[in-house]
Amino acid sequence: MTQLCKHFSSDVLIIGSGIAGLTAAISARQSGVSVILVSKGAGTYAISSGCIDLLGYVANKNGTEAVEAPLSALPLLPKDHPYSLLGKDAVLQAISFFSDILERQKAPYTAGKTEEGAPKNTLLPTILGTVKPSYLIPKTHDSTPLFNGKKILVAGVSGLRDMSPKLCRDGLRRQAGLGDKEMDTVLLPAPLNGLHRSLSTLDLARFVDTKEGETWLETSLGRLAPLYDCVLLPPILGTKNGGEPAERLEKRLGTRLLELLSIPPGVGGIRLHKALMQEARDLGIRFLENVDISAAVLSGSTATCVTTQGTSPERLLASSFILATGGILGGGLTSYPDRIEEKIFRLPVDAPSGLSRTNAHIFDQHPVQSVGVRVDAHLRPAEKDTCLLNNVFLAGRILGGYDHGHEKSGHGVAITTGYMAGIFAARHAKESHGV
């Protein structure tokens, strides 16, 4: 007996709900077309700090160089890098577009400025006492009070094993510009008892969302905080956007509070996800969740629909498709011992034969990090300068040509390619309708 299929149709269909996918959905919808976003999971927000790395490092003949002003460093990137394919103006437009979303959702981000007034990276402290460059950051991660202050308090929480205040302090003392600071440490009392496991930053952030939790943090810091110019904390200042708990606590404590970058769970990423999801809902974007796409149906160089797995399969039709399923970690690419594949559209993956998965130097650049699908200047899959599918556009980590981890460019590429993919896909959909 033939199994019946349900049908869903839209102008633009997006596969993947990470930062690239949601940015693409919002961009396409704002371009005036109908949008459906299909997701199997929830992206990588839960392992993200929520800060937007645009470009932190570039490779040169002497190794790797730190970047102060990322926009000025874009010409140093290879010609097949996503930023190079789209151009500086596209990067600027995408960052402005994304900043506007966060402003509307009352979760504003800021970028640092050079002495000449150009946007620059900000060095953000981590729970390990290291620093890393990032571009767009929420107020609770703004490290200006740390670098400008003289007396710093590093505060951990009893039972939160992910952070040692003394380890963090000792590491920060070795960083440029911080060695002359007077730094003390404190371990705040654990607020939640009876857990069957160690505390996480997400446990504490959810607790601080409550009146009881905010009172706990204020009481725990109340005697010490006024003695310091800045208090460093793990990311526990609530899961909501806007930094409201931080603003209230800073006013009552008489000092600045700064959240450190931490290991997962990514409290900042969860905040960012909430803001993007609310923007998408405000625009009327339709969501199909927990859907596993099995294959695409092609007619020559045009995709007509994608099909789903399950006991009740579905056909999802669209004029344009955006593939934002991530890389190997996100499931957009599948890695085998002898090859790497993209399984929905069967797109060729630019992965050298015999590619090694290991490296003797763990923090060096690695070829597998740059593996992905190559695209043309309109983000359509391409091979040897030939467009393979005229109505399929790619965004985010599934793209090849860049090493997001080594460059510290992951979220920046996701936003830029998501924004432009949304514009390209919407334009194609309108043209196919004769608009």
Image (cartoon, grey):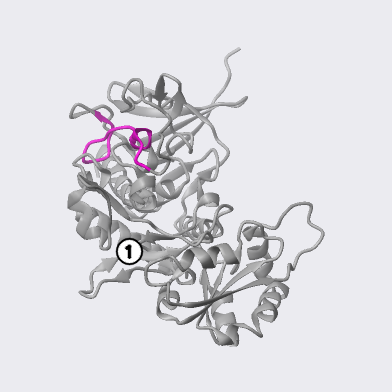
Q: Nearer the viewer, residue 422 or 191?
A: 191
The residue range painted magenta reads 364-382
The image quarter in which residue 120 lies: bottom left
Instruction: Look at 18% across and 41% down and name the residue there.
Output: 79
Assign a secondary structure to mark 1: loop
Left or right: residue 62 compared with residue 293: left
Q: Nearer the viewer, residue 170 or 254?
A: 170
What type of secondary structure mainly makes up the magenta span?
Answer: loop
Q: Can residue 87 be seen by looking at this rendering? A: no
The image quarter in which residue 1 lies: top right
Residue type marked 1: Asn
Residue 176: x, y in percent? Answer: 37, 68
Magenta region includes residue 431: no
The residue pinned by badge 1 equals 121
Callout 1: 10 Å neighbours few (<14), some, many (20+)?
A: many
Left or right: residue 115 compared with residue 27: left
Left or right: residue 57 compared with residue 283: left
Instruction: Look at 44% across and 57% down and name the residue there.
Output: 283
Note whether 434 is above or below 262 in the view shown.
above
Magenta region includes residue 376: yes
Q: Nearer the viewer, residue 69 or 92?
A: 69
Residue 202: x, y in percent? Answer: 63, 59
The image quarter in which residue 375 lies: top left
